[in-house]
Amino acid sequence: MDKQREGRAVVLGGSMAGLFSARVLSEVFAEVTIVDRDELTGPNEARRGLPQRNHLHGLLARGQQIVEEYFPGITEEMRAGGAHIGDVADDVRWIINGKRLAKVRSGLMALTSSRPFLERYVRDRVVAIPEVTIAQNADILRLATTEDQRRVTGVVVRRNGAEETIEADLVVDATGRGSRTPVWVQGLGYGPVPEEKHKIGLGYTTRYYRVPDEAFEGNISINTVASAGVPRGAICQKVDGGRAIVTAYGILGDHPPTDPEGFLDFLKTLAAPDIHEVLQVSEPLDEPAGYKFPANLRRNYHRMTDFPAGLLVAGDAVCSFNPSYAQGMTVAALGSLVLRRHVTASRTPDPLAYFGDLATDAVDGCWSMAIGADLSFPEVEGERTEAVLQGHALIARVQEAATRDTSVARAYMRVIGLVDPPSALSSPEITAALAGAETDR
């Protein structure tokens, strides 16, 4: 028999991480309240609280699987509403080191849409859950705690000019990179939250276009990936509204210009001409817009020795990755599975046990992949251990072999889609395929 729902959980932030959190909390709590400072908006608009809202976002394959599990049928709903779906290795043109990866049916789905479109469909499903409500236009001021500050009992917000306390048995902070939990818990006497930062100095510029369908040559996305030889990349992708989004990026201050001519000139310097050629027959729909991402940031809550009960943290509020790898929303989805497991066992989980599992099951592998990939660019500062260098050598072999061997291309897509761990690229089958591909060169 299912456990009876009891109590109230409060989720801080209507982000994707917040929506995933609310979805799993609704399985065990009688009330789930999402608190957000914005007025949550429609499918073609975006929350003010998401500064990079108009730039390209994507769910990796594992994230798409989790979303469909949480909300059965949502993928088809989004396709009917204007999103595009296809096979991640067969319907996406991957260009790495200037070469196209081999086309192969991977069995993994790619779904392409704008971020506001995706978020609205997920939010509509979440708010349709009877246990879930949204307190919007609410400024989050501080946590409410017991007198001894050992337990969080809710959150104090300001709405319509008045302060109010929303009581809760559990508070989940999903407010993103700007989370104030580190300040709050230190103020409660729990010491500083250990942090790691890795400077990447990423900058990206986005513009929307009307692209003739034939220009995509049957693909739903063209991904020209930055590499050590040419540390500039771009993605041209079909999205909702009959539009295409083009996001170009560069590292360490080598950022795409935000004037139309400079933007096109930047795209012309990529390792392959594909995207630039597509735009020669396309109609721009807006002006280029830029955004900067200074550094990967990880808050190591799992390294703390004490933490107030009744408070957990999720999504970018824990770890914020180089966005060119598109890991953020999928890691948030993976983290929600950890949250689900812990609140199912206890409505007020041990926070340190939760943070430990979150690190192991959702963050560690993706953090290592992101930092390792960043360190493949010689200009990026950081320690290149023997393990990192060996990883670079393996990925270089995999990427080269994936241009000719479909089994390698499929395995590589499963790893970067966070479906399989990086160790899958060292399996006997892939090792043999790599040797065979190198012999055939």
Image (cartoon, helix red, strand yellow):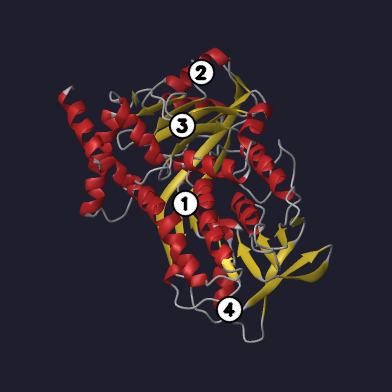
Q: Which mark, by number, is residue 234?
A: 3
Q: Which mark is residue 149?
A: none
Query: Label 3: how many residues lie within 10 Å, few (<14), some (14-19) or many (20+)?
Result: many
Q: Which residue is mark 4?
A: 187
CA–CA distance between discs 1 and 4?
Answer: 27 Å
Mark 2 → mark 1, Cα distance in angstroms = 32 Å
Give the labeled residue for mark 1: 294
Percent across and percent down for residue 175 are 61, 58
Q: Are marks 3 and 2 in contact (CB under 8 Å)?
A: no
The residue under the point 51% across, 48% down is 328
* Quarter of the figure with residue 157: bottom right
Q: Which one is earlier in the sequence, the residue at label 3 or at label 2?
A: 2
Q: Are marks 1 and 4 in contact (CB under 8 Å)?
A: no
Disc 4: CA contacts within 10 A as few (<14), some (14-19) or many (>=20): few
Q: Are marks 4 and 3 in contact (CB under 8 Å)?
A: no
Q: Quadrant of residue 359?
A: bottom left
